[in-house]
Amino acid sequence: METTEEKIYTEEDIQSCIKPLSNNGFIRFFQSLWRKWLGVWYGFAEKKPKLADWIYKIGFFCVFSFSVTVYQFIIMTFLPYAFESLNNGPAGFPQIPIAAAGGKNFTIFGDENGWGYFIAFELAVFTAQCINFPLQRNVTYKSHGNPWVQAAWYFIGWVVVSVATDALWGVCNAFLLHWGSPEVLNGLIKTLLTGFVSMVVFFFIFLKIFPDLNKTAARAEKNYEKLKAKGASAEKLEKAELKKNLAREKADEFNAEQAANKASSLASARAIKYFAFKKECAQAEELYNNMVSAAAPAGELEKAEQNLAAAREKTEKAYAQAIEACKKL
């Protein structure tokens, strides 16, 4: 019976895992930091995959959401001036006077300042979501679903957010105008209010429109087994099986892509870590040998020997981790 010999990995294999850095010193510095971070992150993700997945999604979701909120505030600070001619008094619906706010109107579709401010705000929110959607889809959730269907659901979410925000703002704006609050402060409050409502609504919408492909495949497989157990018709079973196979194919493709990216980054980071420790070990050994040659005091020599032993242990461990990472490529 023919046997296949297991490949013996060497330092050359570890070296080949390191992606070349840019010749530009500035870019090279940040590339190095980024790769070290990826190594730490993927090492953590190996130990705690579910926790890492939630941290990743929530982290990027919040970063992008806060970023578009800042964008909205900047736009709302200047865009209303472009529609200043339309800011000629209360406009919109339903314009219900609020006695406690000095008779200022509660307005959902419109604004107490006029149509200009309302149009500027809706444009700011809409363009912000046009930026937010592709970032959340492609980076946070890494979705491979139908972008048009997802965009349609996202648009529905934006409408819900807009109506909810405008309703809340209709009350807040009446009181702020009654109290004589500055326009910049009003814009900041409205932006933060919109950002908070958007984060809450879109977080749950994203879970719906950007589903976990592995969970989708598992549900499709479970549904197929249920239909099979119930003795469903051949036509239903055929449709369920097709759906199950397509879902599993998408999940496997996504998992393979993720595994390849993870393996490549982890191998590169661990290779860099190994050679860094090897360099430290060489320096510790050189220092120890110099101290021996110079007949250094026993206490200092013992400390240098301990440091050398610790450096060798770290290097050996890093070597084993680098080899293990290379095997997964």
Image: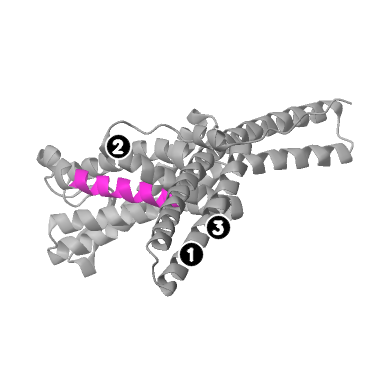
**Taking 125 as reference, is 82 left or right?**
left
Q: List x then y, in percent, for residue 281.
A: 46, 53
Measured along the vertical axis of the image, is residue 256 above or below residue 100? above
Q: Quadrant of residue 139?
A: top left
Give me the disc on residue 317: none
Magenta region, residue range: 59-76
Task: Answer whether residue 63 is magenta in the image.
Answer: yes
Which image quarter is the N terminus in? Answer: top right
| Quadrant housing the C terminus | top right
Q: Which residue is mark 2?
A: 27
Q: Which residue is mark 1?
A: 305
Give whichever of 39, 119 is nearer the camera: 39
Q: Quadrant of residue 186?
A: bottom left
Q: Nearer the viewer, mark 1 or mark 2?
A: 1
Residue 177 locus on image (x, y percent): 16, 60
Q: Between marks 3 and 2, how big is the CA–CA gap? A: 32 Å
Residue indicated by mark 3: 313
